[in-house]
Amino acid sequence: MPELSQESERGRAVVPWGAAEVTGPSMVPTLYHGDRLLVRWGGRVRPGDVVVLRHPFQQDLLVVKRAKERREGGWWVLGDNAFAGGDSTDYGVVPEELVLGRVRLRYRPPGSGRRSPLALVRWAASAVRPVLAERSVSRRLRAR
């Protein structure tokens, strides 16, 4: 499951924006291992938003998932990679107070060995993208 560095949580109470780094494959193809995130701490979460939350059983661990729907007791969250696990199918509904913020932007750092001008142009065209809410929030829920 994508974990976030603890550095991302420092200053969360003071500044409404923060940075985080993704580790793990559970949000592929939306987010990849090594992606950097711009997170808006607090605020209203809507179904389909990619969110940063505390893991319900290991609250010192920050994870990133997609908020699928609000249920009694909190949010049902899923990873975009159905094969990676580590979401509400494993630990159930996440209480509202554990959802810390919404991911607004992802930045992919340049890979090593990208030296040609064409490779740099390709990287620049795809390095920074907004992370948008999924339009069909119930598609995966119906399949289970």
Image (cartoon, rainbow, N blue to C red):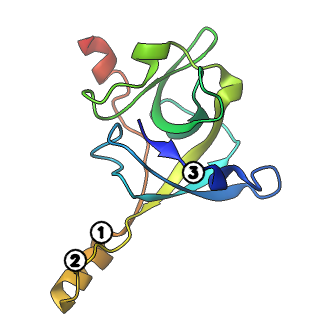
* Residue depicted at 68% across the width and 58% down the height: 17
Residue 123 located left or right of residue 129:
left
Q: Label 2: state its secondary structure.
A: helix
Residue 64 located left or right of residue 15:
left
Q: Quadrant of the N terminus?
A: top left
Q: Quadrant of residue 57?
A: top right
Amino acid on which disc 1 is placed: Ser
Amino acid on which disc 2 is placed: Arg
According to the image, label 2 marks what residue? 122
Q: Residue furthest right?
A: 14
Amino acid on which disc 3 is placed: Ser
* Residue depicted at 25% across the width and 84% down the height: 120
Q: Earlier in the sequence, mark 3 or mark 2?
A: 3
In the displayed structure, 118 sits above or below 138; it is: below
Q: Residues within 10 Å of mark 1 (few under 14, many from 20)?
A: few
User: Along the line of sight, which residue is nearer the eye, 117 or 67?
Assistant: 117
Q: Are marks 1 and 2 in contact (CB under 8 Å)?
A: yes
| Mark in front: 3 vs 2 | 3
In the displayed structure, 110 sits above or below 86; it is: below
According to the image, label 3 marks what residue? 5
Q: Label 3: state its secondary structure.
A: loop
Q: Quadrant of the C terminus?
A: top left
Residue 26 located left or right of residue 2:
left
- Mark count: 3
Q: Are marks 3 and 2 in contact (CB under 8 Å)?
A: no
According to the image, label 1 marks what residue? 126
* Residue depicted at 16% across the width and 86% down the height: 118
Query: Residue 27, how many percent across, how many down?
Result: 35, 40
